[in-house]
Image (cartoon, rainbow, N blue to C red):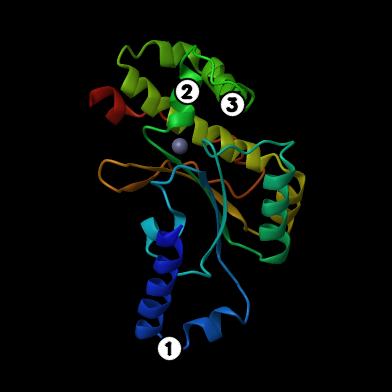
Amino acid sequence: MKAIFEGNKEWIKNTLDKDPNFFNNLSEGQSPEYLWIGCSDSRVPANEIVNLPPGSIFVQRNIANQVGNTDMNLLSVVYYAVKYLKVKHILVVGHYGCGGVLAAMSNNSFGFLDNWLVAIKNVYSKYQDTLDMIDDLEKRGDMLVELNVIEQVRNLAKISFIQKEWKNGEYPQIHGLVYSLKDGVLKDLDSSINTIANMRPVYQINEDILKK
Ligand code: ZN
């Protein structure tokens, strides 16, 4: 635990060196423009990889960045972000090499976690014809990571209070992104949705994955 408290002291010192008013400003409230729905994976920290300071991003993370329509935790976070914080963009952020997605692809049991993996297995079933054509398991996993993001973007678009917001304007916009642990690049899957009319984005088969 020493690393935690020493790290905190060090961070306060560095932060105040850069901006002596940092905590005064931060304690006045938050008005983030983004809601981040990402994976719990320790290698994908929201603020750091997009270089934005505290106060910029409202965050929800779980294994394999799932948007479940019975997940009270997630729905409450999304509701607060949309209705009260008025975030303009919701980012669903997956990442290649996601342990949750790879676990769902296997036939092994992971104990209690199997319950959580069912949703990802369902994404696999939906796209089984396409996925089974890819022999290389890493490439197949990469494609399932992308498809999983697209499906969560769609799940968000099905939420009633988000659809209600769209009747009043163009926000929130929902975006599907994938992060690469190999080079740090965050890629847009071009699956953005901001109206009921385009809530079924067509997934373009990622030729890059097939070529790699
Ligand atoms: Zn992950």
Q: Residues within 10 Å of mark 1 (few under 14, many from 20)?
A: few
Residue 190 in the image, given as x and y percentages of width and height: 44, 43
Residue type at the position of mark 3: Leu
Q: State the residue in front, 182 or 11.
A: 11
Q: Earlier in the sequence, mark 1 or mark 2?
A: 1
Q: Residues within 10 Å of mark 3 (few under 14, many from 20)?
A: few
Q: State the residue in front, 144 or 97.
A: 97
- What numbered label is drawn on residue 113? 3
23 left or right of 162 in image: left
Q: Residue at x 43, y 88 (%)?
A: 20
Residue 89 in the image, given as x and y percentages of width and height: 55, 57
Residue 124 in the image, given as x and y percentages of width and height: 52, 19
* Vertical side of 31 occupied by 70: above or below: above
Label 3 C-beta lies within 8 Å of the nearest ligand 1 atom: no
Q: State the residue in front, 172 or 28.
A: 28
Q: Earlier in the sequence, mark 3 or mark 2?
A: 2
- Residue tagged by mark 2? 103
* Vertical side of 202 occupied by 153: above or below: below
Q: Residue at x 71, y 36 (%)?
A: 69
- The kind of secondary structure element at disc 2 is helix
- What numbered label is drawn on residue 20? 1
Q: Residue at x 37, y 56 (%)?
A: 49
114 left or right of 100 in image: right
- The kind of secondary structure element at disc 3 is helix
Disc 3 versus disc 2: nearer the observer: 3
Q: Seen from this angle, which residue lies furthest bottom?
A: 20
Residue type at the position of mark 2: Ala
Q: CA distance from mark 3 to mark 1?
A: 44 Å
Image marks 3 and 2: residues in contact by CB distance under 8 Å: yes
* Vertical side of 94 occupied by 19: above or below: below
Q: CA distance from mark 3 to mark 2?
A: 9 Å
